[in-house]
Image (cartoon, rainbow, N blue to C red):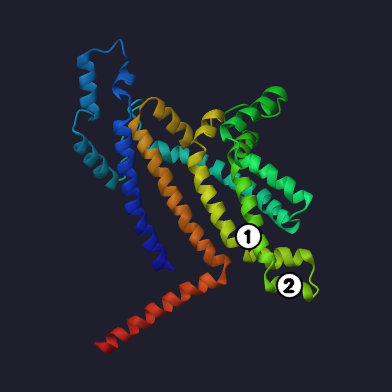
Amino acid sequence: MLKYVGKRLLQIIPVLIIVAILIFVLMYFVPGDPVQIMLGDYHATEEQIQATRARLGLDKPFLVQLWDYLVGLTRLDFGASYIYNINVGQELMHRFPYTLRLALYSLVFVVVVGIPLGVLCAVQAGKTVDRVLMVVTLVLNSMPAFWLGLLLIILFAVKLNWLPTSGIHGWTSWIMPTIATSVGALAGVCRQTRSSMLEVIRSDFVVTARSKGLSERKITYGHALPNALIPIITVCGTRFGAMLGGSTVIEAIYTVPGIGQYMVNAINSRDYPVVRGSILYIAFSFSIIMLVVDLVYAFVDPRIRAQYVKVKKKAESEEEKTPEAA
C-alpha cells in the first residue's frame, strides 16, 4: 500500500509541471498588460512602465520567463503578487482553509442528502416519487451555481433577512455558499446512486437475502448500498475536487476570503503570479483527492484490498527468489 501511495505521489509531479507550463503560456498570451493596469493608462510615463516591467521580469524573453518560473517552483516559490507585493504561497496557505471548509461543507451536504434520495429513487423506481425527483435533479444539475447564489441572496438575505449577504461572520454565513456550491453535485450524486443501486438490487444475492426473510431496510442499506458504493465514491471524489476549484464565482459572490475570490481579483488585474499559484494549488489538491478516493476504494471493497495484498505478497516472493537465483 505504501509503495502504491509513493508511486502515485511521484506521478503528481509531471502533472503539476504540465499544468504549470500550460497556465504560464495561457497567461502570457492573454490580452492585457499587468503593468498598464498597475500604473494606470494615463498617468504613467514610458520610463516608469519600462522600469516596472524590468522590476517584475516582464521584459525578458518568453522562454527565459518560463524557465525562471519553473526553477522557482522547485523551491516552492510562487513569486509575489504584482499588485500587493505579497508572497503568493503564504497568501494561498492563509486562504486555502476557507476554500477547503466550503468544499467540505458542500460535500457533507451532498452525501447526507444526495445518497438517501438516490436510494429512495432506486427503491421506488418507475413510481411517482422517482419521476419527480429525477426531473428535479435534472433541473438542479443544469442550473448555474452563480445564478442560484444570487437568487438565494435575494430571497434569504434581502427579502427575508434571515442570513447575511456576504462575508464570514459565523456559521450562518456558510449556509448560502454551501447550498449554491453543492446543488449541482447533489443532483449528480443522486442520479449516480440511483443508477448504481438499480444494478445491485437486481443481483442474485439481493434475491437470496429477500428469500431469507430479511427486511427491505436491511437489504437496501446492509447489502445493496455497500456493493454500489464504488461508482458513488468516484462521483463524490470528483465532485469534491470540482468544488475546490469550481467555487471561484461563489466565493466572489459571497465574499468568502478563499482561493476563488483571490483568483478572480487576480484575473481582473492580470496578477499573473496569483493566478498561476492558485491554479497549481487547486491542481495539487485535486490530485491528492483522487489518491484518497483510490484508497477509500480499498477500505470499502474487500476485493480491491485483496489486490493490494496480492501485489505486496508477489513483490515479497520475488525478492526472496532473487538471492536464491544469485
Q: Nearer the viewer, residue 95 or 60?
A: 60
Task: Report x, y in % for residue 47.
Answer: 19, 15
Residue at the extreme bottom of the image, as rendered: 324
Q: Is residue 280 above or below residue 300?
A: above
Helix, strand or loop status at disc 2 = helix
Which kind of residue does numbered mark 2 sit on? Answer: Val
x and y, in percent, of residue 9 in the image: 38, 58
> Mark 1: few, some, or many residues within 10 Å (few <14, many ≥20)?
many
Residue occupied by mark 1: 196
Q: For this rendering, which residue is in front, 181 or 102?
A: 181
* Secondary element type, mark 1: helix
Give the alpha-carbon distance from disc 2 to disc 1, as whole Å: 17 Å
Query: Residue 207, labelled with which disc?
Result: 2
Within the image, what quadrant is residue 275 found in?
Answer: top left
Q: Is residue 167 above or below residue 234?
A: above
Residue type at mark 1: give it.
Ser
Q: Is residue 105 above or below residue 164?
A: below
Q: Residue at x 26, y 40 (%)?
A: 69
Q: Quadrant of residue 122?
A: bottom right
Of label 2 and label 1, which has the lower sequence position?
A: 1
